Image (cartoon, rainbow, N blue to C red):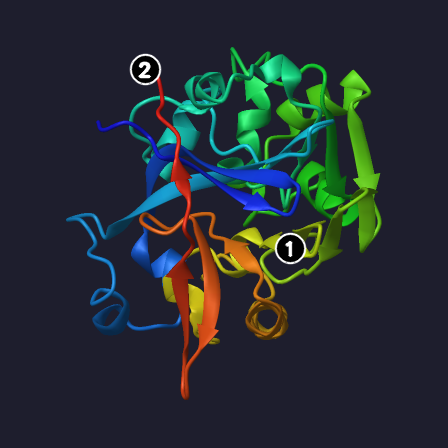
Amino acid sequence: MSSPRVETISVGDWQVVAIEERRFGMDGGSMFGVVPRLLWSRKITPDEENRVPMRANIFLVRTGDANVLLDTGLGNCLAPMDRKIYAPTGESTLEDSLAALGLSVDEITHVILTHLHTDHSNGVFSGNPDRPDLRFPRAQHFVQSDEWDDAMHPDERSAPVYHIERFTRLMDSGRLTLLQGDQQVMHGISVAKTGGHTRGHQGVRVTSAGDRFFYYADIVPTRFHLKGPWVSALDLYPVDTMKAKRALLSECCDTDTVLGLCHDTEVMMARIVRHEKWMDAVPVDSVPVPVVR
């Protein structure tokens, strides 16, 4: 496996670092919902089991006073069912990627989780999946209260991607803050509740010295999902996803906002450009960070 990608951009006085935390596979039909395979397979090639390649791209905001992690990826604290669902390859790169930036897991101060599906939140944990430790022991973790309630009381459809026993460890640690709707987490960093993918899904908005970076996770997981009806079959409220996506992409176009893409295999951070009939994701100029393996 080649070295994971770690890229950084300046957002005002701050830095935003995109980290390819892990590679995995996902059923193509799950990722593209009602879009026929005939169409989506022209964009991304599935394997013999109909899985398409995915990346768990996560983002680190470095303010000088805080190190804020936006989602945590799959991590290494995986049970056999997790591996069956996500078909991950290799190991989590996060510790090595942080080391390349001169950081350790102990220096992460905040973890903002867009939602609690395994591919976005399981990196919170380390060690034995049945008796996990907190991977970021000094960080405060932030999630929408609706998302937390649904994760702790999953239905039959959601149960495979929510892990009550692991989340209980986080709750008992005293390092969990439940948010109610749109809220400021700290100066320059706020969350916006979107719904759509899950009832409590949220996006993160970062603003510094007039520059803006948004991370809306599974509202726009890849550049192929810029089209309105290209919505994952995993979205519980697809009409809400389309509504949130429409507003988000228009705002990004109008304000020159950089958007983070959580599962794209090539583009981790992009500006959204409006053409006559469609929108496009244009990669931003970023600085690669060498990763020591």
Q: Position of residue 94 (x, y in %)?
A: 46, 24
Residue marked by disc 1: 211
Q: Which mark is residue 225?
A: none
Marks 2 and 1, how far apart at CA: 33 Å
Q: Does 233 sit left or right of 29 as displayed?
A: right
Q: Nearer the viewer, residue 236 or 209?
A: 209
Answer above or below: position of 270 versus 10.
below
Residue drawn at (59%, 37%) of the image: 162
Residue marked by disc 2: 293
Q: Secondary structure at mark 1?
A: strand
Is the Cβ of the residue at disc 2 closer than 8 Å to that at disc 1? no
Q: Name the amino acid, label 2.
A: Arg
Q: Secondary structure at mark 2?
A: loop
Q: Name the amino acid, label 1.
A: Asp
Answer above or below: position of 59 versus 91.
below
Residue 131 visible in rendering: yes
Q: Quadrant of the C terminus?
A: top left
